[in-house]
């Protein structure tokens, strides 16, 4: 049996070799294949991968022409991996490689097609980030057909048929966590505690994560598009009832011209709300626009 490790790397010079040593040090009893995906690093990550490939014939790499993002790197790695079993994990050792034997055993038992790892605590993470993450999974589960547990990572081992299923989705805007949930199959969940990075620093900023969640949500749910219609119907009903009330009141007691502040507030509120809805429309339109161009998800500069 052959196990492929798909490892996205972006400016990870200090981590690549540590990662390789850690995996080799496990002494796994199966054939290994390393697929390092250099996501357009500006440091010497590619050189390190090339050196490793010279030393160890199991090491392969794909190098992008520029930074295309982790999702693109995962796709390239999955396409290149030839193993019967494929695992995707981070190079910074935040996805503990010590889980690999347990994952392999679970897959080999034949009861599962997929083994995924979940972080159970978020020690060392800013509280605001944890809060938004919880919020994201809550909204995602409510609004989309895919169900996620929260604390999900991209650390996942899968059989060849799951890999083929994931690769059969041709969208350009790839939200891998959602794709895994969408393709289904029997998944076993393992948990691990948050680990600090082995070296280097995180590539994710707070706003980067916000953008990522909007991408993810709009890739798997069209519910926000219905927001405008639902609110429209509600406010029409309210306006109608109010109209009846005003007409009756004027006929019975008569009324001087008041209600100027109410009017201003309503105009501002609905003006803002309409812009918000147009923004949602724009998000989906932009997605459709990008998808219809059918540009490749990444461009390869060098591979072995
Ligand atoms: N990564 C990548 N392309 C990017 C950003 C990150 O391939 O544009 C890789 C990175 O090298 C690492 C993994 O994705 O192996 C996770 O990134 P990071 O550790 O920065 O994220 P965090 O663990 O903080 O969520
Ligand atoms: Mg990390």
Image (tube, rainbow, N blue to C red):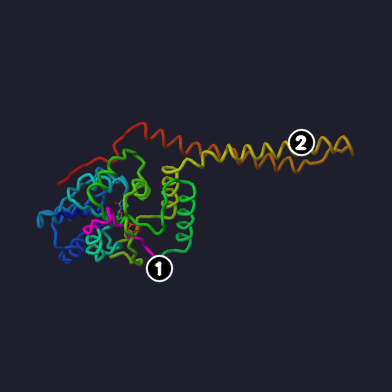
- CB contact under 8 Å: marks 2 and 1: no
- Indicate whether residue 120 is drawn in magenta: yes
Quadrant position of the N terminus in the picture: bottom left
What is the span of residues highlighted in magenta in the rendered image?
Answer: 107-124
Q: Which residue is mark 1?
A: 123
Q: Nearer the viewer's eye, disc 2 or disc 1?
A: 2
Q: In the rendered structure, find residue 182 and report the number of the disc placed on it.
A: none
* Rendering quarter of residue 228: top right
- Indicate whether residue 201 is drawn in magenta: no
Q: Is residue 271 left or right of residue 28?
A: right
* Rendering quarter of residue 219: top left
Q: Is residue 134 left or right of residue 35?
A: right
Q: Measuring 17% from the left and 48% from the top, which residue is drawn there? A: 82
Question: Quarter for ligand 2?
Answer: bottom left
Q: Is residue 27 left or right of residue 112?
A: left
Q: Which residue is mark 2?
A: 243
Measured as percent of width and height from the top left, residue 304 is found at 14, 47
Quick one: label 1, few (<14), some, or many (20+) residues within 10 Å? few
Q: Nearer the viewer, residue 86 or 183?
A: 183
Measured as percent of width and height from the top left, residue 185 is found at 31, 50
């Amino acid at each position: 049996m052959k196990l492929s490790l798909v490892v996205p790397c972006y400016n990870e010079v200090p981590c690549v070799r540590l990662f390789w040593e850690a995996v080799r040090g496990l002494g796994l009893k199966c054939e290994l294949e390393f697929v390092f995906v250099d996501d357009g690093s500006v440091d010497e990550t590619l050189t390190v991968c090339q050196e490793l490939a010279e030393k160890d014939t199991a090491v392969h790499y794909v190098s992008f022409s520029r930074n295309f993002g982790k999702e693109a790197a995962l796709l390239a790695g999955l396409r290149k991996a030839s193993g019967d079993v494929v695992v995707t994990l981070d190079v910074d050792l935040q996805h503990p490689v010590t889980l690999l034997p347990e994952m392999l055993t679970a897959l080999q038992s034949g009861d599962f097609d997929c083994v995924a790892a979940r972080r159970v605590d978020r020690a060392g993470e800013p509280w605001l980030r944890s809060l938004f993450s919880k919020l994201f999974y809550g909204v995602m589960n409510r609004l989309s057909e895919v169900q996620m547990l929260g604390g999900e990572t991209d650390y996942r081992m899968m059989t060849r048929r799951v890999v083929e299923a994931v690769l059969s989705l041709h969208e350009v805007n790839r939200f891998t966590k959602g794709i895994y949930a969408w393709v289904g199959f029997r998944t076993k969940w393992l948990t691990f505690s948050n680990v600090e990075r082995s070296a280097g620093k995180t590539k994710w900023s707070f706003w980067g994560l916000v953008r990522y969640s909007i991408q993810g949500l709009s890739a798997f749910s069209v519910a926000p598009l219905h927001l405008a219609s639902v609110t429209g119907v509600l406010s029409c009903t309210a306006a109608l009832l109010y109209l009846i009330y005003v007409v009756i009141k004027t006929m019975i007691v008569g009324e001087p011209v008041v209600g100027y502040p109410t009017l201003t507030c309503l105009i501002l509120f609905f003006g803002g709300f309409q812009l918000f809805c147009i923004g949602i429309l724009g998000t989906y339109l932009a997605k459709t626009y990008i998808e219809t161009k059918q540009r490749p998800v990444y461009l390869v500069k060098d591979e072995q």
